[in-house]
Image (cartoon, rainbow, N blue to C red):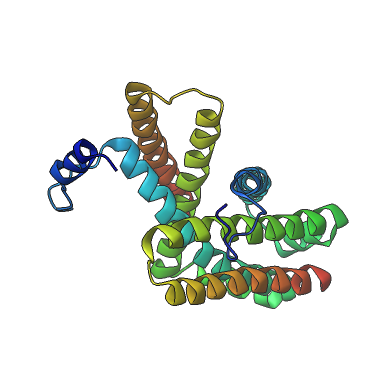
Amino acid sequence: MELSEQNVKKQRPVHLDLQTIRMPAPAIASILHRISGVIMLFAVGILIWLLNSSLASAESFAGVQALFDSFVVKFIVWGILTALGYHLLGGIRHLVMDSGRWEELASGTASAKGLFVLTVAFSIVAGIWVW
Amino acid sequence: MVTNAASFGRSGVHDYILIRASAVILACYSIFLVGFIALSSPLTFDVWHGLFSTLPMKVFTLLALFALLIHAWIGVWQVLTDYIKCTALRGVLQFIFVITAFSYLAAGIVIVWGV
């Protein structure tokens, strides 16, 4: 390593104070995609349990329907739908970016914000549907 | 060459393709199932049971759960390798998540088999 290169490395500022780092919209979109993905992995466990009960017999199907009278169950299902909607829409955004579009700062920020707006809209519709 | 025993595909390119291919299957299944439930209200046991008693729906369900195994394996690997620096802990967590996804597939096989 050359001396000048060492100097450059030594003088580079290190900023790791996460409290003061402002996350741009694409960064928030990225971390939410990861969080919603992990949520979905747990959610599928709940959904498979519901699928099993709903298909076992007419009585257990009625039991699953009765579960939806509870606010907590409705809230969990609404949460799962919101996480699924966000993860799916974010995934479509990823596929568009694979094609070379929305890769610049302005278009990437705009598409991330569009993703948030679409998710909020979907989440509201899902909420109306569940309740 | 960097090799990683915990990743799913043979290489990063392989993972890249697999996570997208499985994503397309999962997206189709999710949209179909949510759409089916939304459009067939009130959803009765006969309609629901009838849907899952058909061979295409059983295959579609198992295909989605197999896609989930691949998708979750790669996705969890990406998340864990970024945040968990302790190799032993990362290995244990990857193991737990992968057997969870395997269990979902196993449960799905038993569920649609019995319909």
Residue B7: x, y in percent?
Answer: 59, 60
Whether residue A81 is visible to the viewer of this picture, yes or no, is yes
Query: Along the line of sight, which residue is nearer the eye, A67 or B89?
Result: B89
Q: Residue furthest right?
A: B55
Looking at the image, which residue is at 19% across and 36% down? Answer: A4
Q: Position of residue A111 (x, y in %)?
A: 39, 29
Tell which of B72 and B87 is nearer to you.
B87
Number of on-image labels: 0
Q: Residue furthest front?
A: A2
Q: Position of residue A24 (x, y in %)?
A: 26, 37
Along the line of sight, the residue nearer the viewer: A74 or A9? A9
Q: Residue at x 43, y 48 (%)?
A: A33
Up-down relation of residue B67 to residue B92 (above or below): above
Q: Residue at x 45, y 45 (%)?
A: A86
The quadrant of the image that shows the C terminus of chain B is bottom right
The picture places residue A128, in percent across and down from the top left corner, at: 43, 48
Quarter of the image where one finds residue B65: bottom right
Left or right: where B5 falls relative to A22: right
Please say if A30 is above or below B63: above
Q: Is B42 located above or below residue B84 in the figure?
A: above
Asked if residue B40 can be seen in this view, the reply is no
| Closer-to-camera residue (B74/B103) | B74
Location of residue A17 with respect to A28 vertically, above or below: below
Image point (67%, 49%), residue name? B29
Left or right of residue B54, residue A17 in this image: left
